[in-house]
Amino acid sequence: MFNRVRCSVVSVSSHQLYRVQFEEMKKAASFSTGQWQSRWWGTFIGLCFMGFSLLTIMANKVVLTTCGFNYPNIMMATQMVVLILIILLLRMIDPVNLNAKFQYESTHVMFFSIFFSVQSVLSLSALEGMNLPLFGALKRCTALMNLLLSVTILKNGFPPVLRTIGVLLITGGCIMAGLGDVKFEWMAYTYGLLSVISKSIYLTIGEMLGRLGFNSLDVLYTSVVLSLPMFVWMGILNRELTTDTLLYFAREDNQFFFATYAAAIVLGALVTIFTLKSTTINSALTTSLFSSMKTTVQSICGYFLFGDVKLTVLLLSGLSINMLGGFLYGCAKPNKSDTGQCNENETDQESDEELEKALIK
């Protein structure tokens, strides 16, 4: 009798153990599937950001230089209006999941809005005075700033050696290319450098907001609402809102300008959405990686489409080193914090703890 009871107890315990192991295998399989889905979704968002950003820069360059419409604050104010309309449209389509709220109580969101506004205007001001290859080379230096901020502020730890070498090559190549620019405009380069710093800060703040659990649409909606009056006020101070500006829009023979301006505004709004989405889903470093890939294509297109680049040995060498750094940066194995994935050891430890609890029960 005692042996039967003991055998039945052992049988029940073995059955429970197998059941727990089976459940753990299911959890591991579902985690792996969700991990791959998350990576594919993050890659898709990053590629959308890269494509729309490339088209936006091309359209902005045409508006600023070819059409001669050098009014960055007006362009950004118009873009903010379009962004508000897009967000309101998204809320009408899916009011449950896209219920954007005004996060006025968050200091992080306030600083995100300020640096976002500053970066946008400085970037357009730099683009007006620089050719596309050098503008792209300078914007690649965002990776260096994101690297420093991720280590000092986000406490992500030092990146792999290959990635660090890539960032240093990006920066050194940019400096060399700038020295070889025969049409060097110090004001445009100053605007570009300041835009790199401000963009790195707002990307880092965006990653912090994602870690704090903020909805990306809430952050975007708040930033747009706060940025719109800033752009209007800066436009008034810089005397961009004048009669000449209004007459520029009133001309009937400006069909090409209207089409390009509309494309630049709509594409710029989409880039803003995908930039924040990529930063919250991936990381600031990964977003700057997609930006570096984009600037390589941008440099080639800018040289053949606009033809405002006078090639020199220093310029070609600097651009080549800059692109090589971007390639090494992309080939480097990312940190766990860069991909937004959890630590595998932590996951295994949590699974072991859950298994022990189940066995005890």
Image: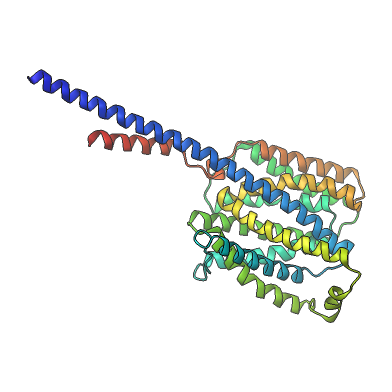
Which residue, as the protein is rendered here, is positioned at the far left? 1
Q: Position of residue 342 (x, y in %)?
A: 48, 42
Q: Which is nearer the eye, 313 or 56?
A: 56
Tell me the residue at 80%/48% (across/down): 298
Q: Which is nearer the eye, 7 or 96?
A: 96
Q: On screen, 348 above or below 1?
A: below
Q: Is residue 301 left or right of residue 94?
A: right
Q: Position of residue 7 (x, y in %)?
A: 16, 20
Which residue, as the protein is rendered here, is positioned at the far bottom? 243
Q: Which is nearer the eye, 188 or 233?
A: 233
Tell me the residue at 85%/59% (across/down): 62
Which residue, as the protein is rendered here, is positioned at the far front? 93
Considering the image in quadrants, where does the C terminus appear? top left
Tell me the residue at 75%/70% (across/down): 73
Q: Position of residue 205 (x, y in %)?
A: 57, 58
Q: On screen, 61 above or below 85?
A: above
Residue 187 in sight in this render: no
Tell me the residue at 66%/36% (across/down): 331
